[in-house]
Image (spheres, rainbow, N blue to C red):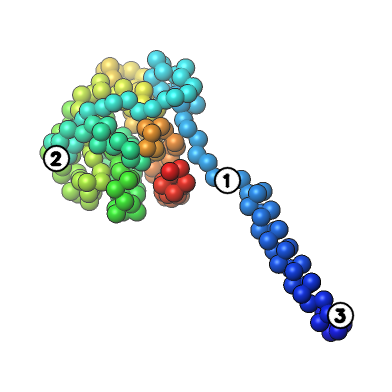
Amino acid sequence: MLLFLKRYKYYLVGVVVFSAIFLSISFRLLTPKKTLPIFNPSDVNPELVDSTVQHISKYHTIADFSFTNQNGKTITQKDYEGKIYVADFFFTTCPTICPIMQDNMVDIQNEFINNPQVMLLSHTVMPHIDSVPVLKNYAIEKGVVDSKWNLVTGDKKDIFYIARKSYLAVKTETAGELYDMVHTENFILVDEQKRVRGFYDGTKKEEVARLIEDIHFLLGKEK
């Protein structure tokens, strides 16, 4: 036996090395590559989408916008040009899901604090309450880093339309004042080309972890 092993040791080593390489390549080929979908209005629950765009099935991007942030600065799409960002909708007096969502958004902020390629954008759905000073106090309370995360207010109609025509993520009241919005727990991932790439439950740590993983994927794999 020892004589056999000695005589054929190079052959056996070659077989082992070849087998290892073959198995490694096979595993890579058989393992599906990670991809992220590109969401269009027709892909999303119609309750979250304005009826005028529900038929759109391709080429959907976030529309131009202009809002005012916690420092009184005008924020437009140019501030997010070429960035990956996470958007959501909230209001400062929300006692239920908003505090959880904003705490989880802080986790995302901290994960990418040193990466200027990643930003955050939170829209109030109650602009009549959430004035600039109110947003500023809220930002300080939550630990918002101004260069990374904008809390924005503006015309209620503009917020309503961007929520439902662009981000595809906000419900309406069944009855009440025009443009009434019922925000959801959604965090929306937007890529450098202004396309919606994912929806995540902002109240769940495992969903936020998945979102962070997907941001890293966009940063590393889709250059």
Disc 1/disc 3 C-alpha distance (Å): 43 Å
Lower sequence index among marks 1 and 3: 3
Assign a secondary structure to mark 2: loop
Q: Which residue is mark 3?
A: 4
Q: Which residue is mark 1?
A: 33
Q: Is residue 96 visible?
A: no
Disc number for residue 16: none
- Position in image of residue 123 (x %, y %): 27, 34
Indicate whether 105 appears above or below 62: below
Lower sequence index among marks 2 and 3: 3
Disc number for residue 71: 2
Disc 2/disc 3 C-alpha distance (Å): 80 Å
Question: Which residue shows up at 67% across the image and 48% down it?
Answer: 30
User: Are the residues tagged 1 and 3 within 8 Å (C-beta)?
Assistant: no
The label nearer to you, 2 versus 1, is 1
Residue 165, picture quadrant:
top left
As shown in the figure, which amino acid type bears the numbered disc 2?
Answer: Asn
Indicate whether 110 appears above or below 53: below
Lower sequence index among marks 2 and 1: 1
Residue 59, picture quadrant:
top left
Question: Which residue shows up at 65% across the image and 49% down it?
Answer: 29
User: Dot 2: within a 10 Å radius of its alpha carbon, few (fewer than 14), some, or many (20 or more) residues?
Assistant: some
As shown in the figure, which amino acid type bears the numbered disc 3?
Answer: Phe
Assign a secondary structure to mark 3: helix
Q: Nearer the viewer, residue 208 or 67?
A: 67
As shown in the figure, which amino acid type bears the numbered disc 1?
Answer: Lys
Question: Which residue shows up at 49% across the image and 22% down it?
Answer: 57
